[in-house]
Image: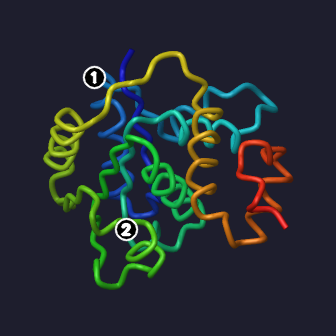
Amino acid sequence: MKPVVFISHSAHEPWVSDLCDQLHPALTDAFEPRLDREEMAELAVGEDWPDALSDWLCECQAAVILLDEKALESVWVQAEASHLFFRRRSDDVLIVAVNCGIDINALPSFLQKTTGLMTTEWLTADSGNPQDTVQRIIAVLTEKCPTPGGDIDPRASFLEKALGVLEMEIKEDRSLNLAAKALGRTKDIAPWSFR
């Protein structure tokens, strides 16, 4: 079983789109890449693509986040990054951030402070040589990507781990208590945390 690698991007810049086009097939020998414009085309008519996207975020052992100016503005890239960084708090997921021409000091505060992005594996893309960037991404993934964990349901595994993280933070936060109740998970959380 190959490790799953999720590719997060906005790709409005032609050279970033070209980087995606080269990265996806280059990963297929050693990894199972998940790129929305490739795998989404294979979804059945009427299949819920946000659910598929969520599954990919839960099942991946690694993620490559291509950060250009448009990606920083993208609600989808922000949501994907937030999901991945939340997962990293309780899970063994490698996140490779690829700087595609952004000013790192101008990153939104949610990326700088809350996600741990600044401690993530960083690469700088070469807009004139996407093949070199692809090879450097593959080198990092090959060296550091965790191995798949078997036949575990990725969404259930994510929810269990997320519950563990939330349980640590739930003691005094009424909104998290209400969320746990809504999920029907009150039996798993210390009774003293509910009011």
Which percent across, then down, holds residue 47? 77, 31
Please name whichever residue, 180 or 18, is drawn nearer the observer in this view of the structure: 180
The three-letter code of the residue at mark 1 reads Ala
Q: Earlier in the sequence, mark 1 or mark 2?
A: 1
Q: Are marks 1 and 2 in contact (CB under 8 Å)?
A: no
The residue under label 2 is 68
Above-or-below relation of 80 to 45: below
Please name whichever residue, 17 or 166, is drawn nearer the observer in this view of the structure: 166
Which percent across, then down, holds residue 53? 61, 41
How many neighbours does mark 1 have within 10 angstroms: few (below 14), some (14-19), or many (20 or more)? some
The three-letter code of the residue at mark 2 reads Asp
How many neighbours does mark 2 have within 10 angstroms: few (below 14), some (14-19), or many (20 or more)? many
Q: Is 51 placed left or right of 89 in the picture?
A: right
Which percent across, then down, holds residue 147? 33, 26
Q: CA distance from mark 1 to mark 2?
A: 26 Å
Badge 1 element: loop
Please tell me which residue is depicted at 20% across the width and 58% down the height of the picture.
Answer: 123
- The label on residue 30 is 1
Quadrant of the rendering where the C terminus is positioned: bottom right
Which percent across, then down, holds residue 157? 58, 33
- The answer to which quarter of the image holds residue 50 is top right
Please tell me which residue is depicted at 28% across the width and 77% down the height of the picture.
Answer: 104
